[in-house]
Amino acid sequence: MQTRTNGQYGQLAAGAAIGLAAGLALPLARKALMQAPSAATGDWAEALKAEHRLVEKAFEAALATTEDDVMKRDMLLAKIAYALTKHAIQEENVIYPAMMQHGQQDQARALIEDHGRIKTFIFELRNIDAGDVMWRSTLQGFYDDLRTHIREEEDVIFPAFHAALPEAESARLTAMMNWEGFKVA
């Protein structure tokens, strides 16, 4: 009888160990999956562009909804807020400080101010009922401002900054940015 009980304890311990390993591995796997599209580009500027495209798609999906799509609007706003928060952390913790180190303080500060306005827009949208007729027009205004920010980064600021960086520095920023994204994914 004693051997059978020890065998059951062994199975229980093995099951607990497997459960613990899965519990520890799953969040890391989820984080890796969330950061994979950005990391796959291999370059910080391309990663940020890829993230911009994902956010734009979420905005377009949200703008295609009607006042009756309350749950869908809420889900899409959550997706937009999450993606923009992750994206902002990567830029604010890595790219903008690097820009400041390379003499682009004014541009970096302006982009940080844009991020503040974006966070305010998210807050405002969360305070408007998703079924309210004002929700869509507020989202559209938010999207218009965001697209201006994106165009400025992609067409002017980031290409110039990227071109001024030595390849090793750009690779270091890419690794740092991917780590920031992984941490918050």
Image: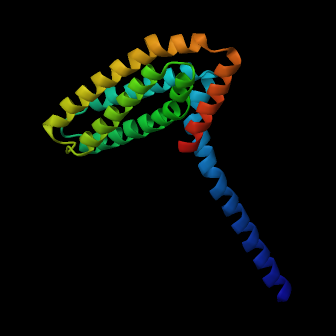
Q: Where residue 130 sits: x, y (%)?
A: 22, 42
Can residue 185 be seen in this snapshot? no
Q: Nearer the viewer, residue 69 or 45?
A: 45
Q: Report the residue at 33% width, 29% height from top.
A: 59
Q: Quadrant of residue 2?
A: bottom right
Determine the residue located farthest toward the left in the rendered image: 133
Position of residue 179 relative to residue 102, above or below, is below
Q: Report the residue at 52% width, 12% height from top.
A: 159
Q: Report the residue at 53% width, 35% height from top.
A: 93
User: Which image quadrant: the N terminus?
Assistant: bottom right
Q: Where residue 67 sits: x, y (%)?
A: 18, 38
Can residue 110 be seen in this snapshot? yes
Q: Nearer the viewer, residue 31 or 163?
A: 163
Q: Where residue 143 sits: x, y (%)?
A: 30, 26
Q: Report the residue at 29% width, 23% height from top.
A: 145
Q: Quadrant of residue 84?
A: top left
Q: Nearer the viewer, residue 125 or 15?
A: 125
Residue 13 horizontal side relative to residue 170, left or right: right
